[in-house]
Amino acid sequence: MPHPFVVIMGKAVRHAARLRGGGSALPGLFVEKISPDFIKQTLAQLPRGVVVISGTNGKTTTTKMVVSLLEAHGLKVFTNRTGSNFTRGVAAALLGDIDIKGKLDADIAVLELDEAHAVHFVKAIPPRYSLLLNVMRDQLDRFGEIDATAKMLEKIAQATTDTVVLNREDRRVLAIKDSLHDQNVELFGLSNNLLPDFPSDDELRGGIAKKTARPEASVILQKYKGNQATYHIAGQDLTTTLKLNGVYNVFNSAAAIALTRAILGNETQSDIVISTIATVTPAFGRGEELEVGGHPLELVLVKNPSGFRLGLKSFSPVGYATMIAINDNYADGRDMSWLWDVDFESLSELGVSEVSGIRAYDMALRLQYDEVAIGHIEPDLTFALRQFISTNNDMPKRIYCTYTAMLALRKELSKITKVEVVS
Amino acid sequence: MSKQTITVVQLYPKDMNIYGDYGNLLVLQRRLEWYGYEPNIIHYNVGDTFPNDVDIIVGGGGQDSGQEIIHADLIAMGPKLKTLAEAGVPMLMVCGLYQLFGNFFKTSQNKILTGIGILDVETYGTNERLIGNIVTNNADFGDIIGYENHSGQTYLGDNTEPFANVIKGAGNNSKDAHEGARYKNVIGTYLHGSILPKNPLIADFLIHTAVTKKYGEFSTDVVDDLLAGLARDTAGGRPR
């Protein structure tokens, strides 16, 4: 049980940080400094243990889906909802949920963790289940190389005590299977028909192509068209209509179902799984749809070339005005090289209405070389957003944005429309 | 009159593409078009037949695993590339291929990967990653702006000039204040970004050298580099 003083002080800092409108990690940082065992002691109380979700893309939306699926089956779930996926983000979320005696009223913890932090986290707290989504080029300025990131995921898998759920279609993630001896392994995957919709970094510039012969997977995304998805689950085809948009979000739903089945085993009810998946919406900024002036405005988070390529492939520009906002703060990654591994020719017919963010001119330069026409370039996000909305007031809008640009834009948008508050 | 052709070869795009260095090829392709030439782009991968008629060669960075895959093929190609370098063919080699254009790369596990020795440099793998925004300066090209990310540290021998002096950042290694290497028209550098989009003078050096070598004179067309200038202004002032 954590020391009561730590709990009270931590809660006080959390309250003060919120009054300031500050970040979600500050109170966690406070607790981490004065009581390093705080998270371990608190999570050790949970009867169904800890679940860790990691990988480059899709952690936040997938975690949200797993939480919904478990809650629909009657479990009380603790999670780090803010997408603050560092250890101190977990500590901050715990502070919000525990009572004054340090007791956490939950059956299970489902945590999304950044790859590098997860490695440290699982050393202290071995998860009962883990879900490893993918390894893609992301902020190589932090981790060095893709192969190094894959090693991190392998360590998470090896620290897992019960079941590891792996993406069959990512060759680096699938390879982790061979390093596991004591764990159960479950796979999720795509039908052969859907494989071409997921270009990987390896296939970029004609590299290693995907194999069509692959091991059996317990959950497969069989078909996806419009917003109709068919899953193949334990020998059965189940079809539903989704609120999720973007093919990568839909693939993540297959991952969430596979993990849920691993956790619940015989308690899993297929009808509850399907009806719950149908109602899940994307996590904030991940294809989230807001309304501005009677028209939809979509926010699509882009943080690496594969994610940006999938985004451009998932959402047709026809009928939409497009804005791109690129920041280079620490959380976005400082390096702009990645923009050159994204092909923007799909935007060349209709052009990009507004280019913004700290690195607006890098983005504009990138578009120049794909011969994509640009309406305005305005590094200031607030001015750019206003200009984008007033220039395109009579049509649906879509903004591709990096992480810190997305946070700033949501804040600005909350002044003019309803934006879900995420705490 | 049909357009004059310039052949650009990218070395090993399948295995050495990790870092947005594709931008360099795209910039050469588009600028050649904008200057009124016909770019002939060739992707050379392990086992392919190397073209006879080559005007510009570019190569990028890869993971350690990528370097191992291409190593034997590159060694076999070495004499041919060396002949082209001696003949003044312009080349731009970034990061991983810069290292292998040198004499050798000794990994942090003391494994030696022999290079093709066009640049008189040697590289040692370390546990220190030199990472971040970088600004260098070269008398011909002025300030050069990019992003470095390497744990291999490179030292220059007597027969190669540094490509540039470091103004902000690390460069070849953590001791000397220079970046990259230059021999005849071959440039080796650690700069990603990609390097050519924000440094159009280097792109035009490669193009100008190739075109005058082949056709004797260069187009009088002008490319609008306003956006490159603005992007340089921002990038030069960003934190490491």
Image: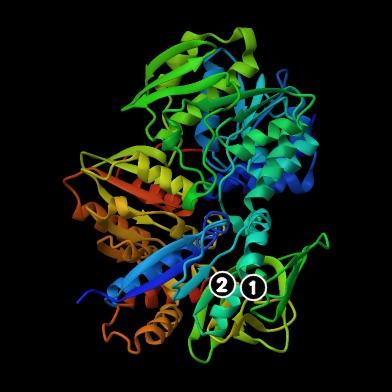
Name the quadrant containing residue A5. Answer: top right
Identify which residue is drawn at 46% across, 75% down.
B56
Please give the label number shown on residue B93: 2
Q: Look at the picture and state if A350 lies above or below B56.
A: above
Identify which residue is drawn at 77% across, 65% down.
B126
- Quick check: B153 left or right of A230? right
Number of residue marks: 2
In this rendering, does residue A11 appear at all?
A: no
Q: Are marks 1 and 2 in contact (CB under 8 Å)?
A: yes
Q: Earlier in the sequence, mark 1 or mark 2?
A: 2
- Quick check: A323 left or right of B140? left
Q: Chain of mark 2?
A: B
Identify which residue is drawn at 28% across, 82% down.
B222
Residue B58 in percent (x, y) is at 50, 70
Q: Quadrant of the N terminus of chain A?
A: top right
Q: Look at the picture and state if A412 lies above or below A421.
A: below
Q: CA distance from mark 1 to mark 2?
A: 8 Å
Residue designated by label 1: B101
Question: Who is closer to the viewer here, A6 or A235?
Answer: A235
Residue lying furthest left: A394
Question: Who is closer to the viewer here, A313 or A51?
Answer: A313
Estimate how packed mark 1 is, as few (under 14), some (14 to 19) or many (20 or more) residues with alpha carbons within 10 Å.
many
Residue type, mark 1 in image: Phe
In this rendering, does residue B110 appear at all?
A: yes
Question: Who is closer to the viewer here, A81 or B213?
Answer: B213
Residue type, mark 2 in image: Met
* Same chain assignment for discs 1 and 2: yes
Question: Who is closer to the viewer here, B43 or B59?
Answer: B43
- Quick check: A406 left or right of B190? left
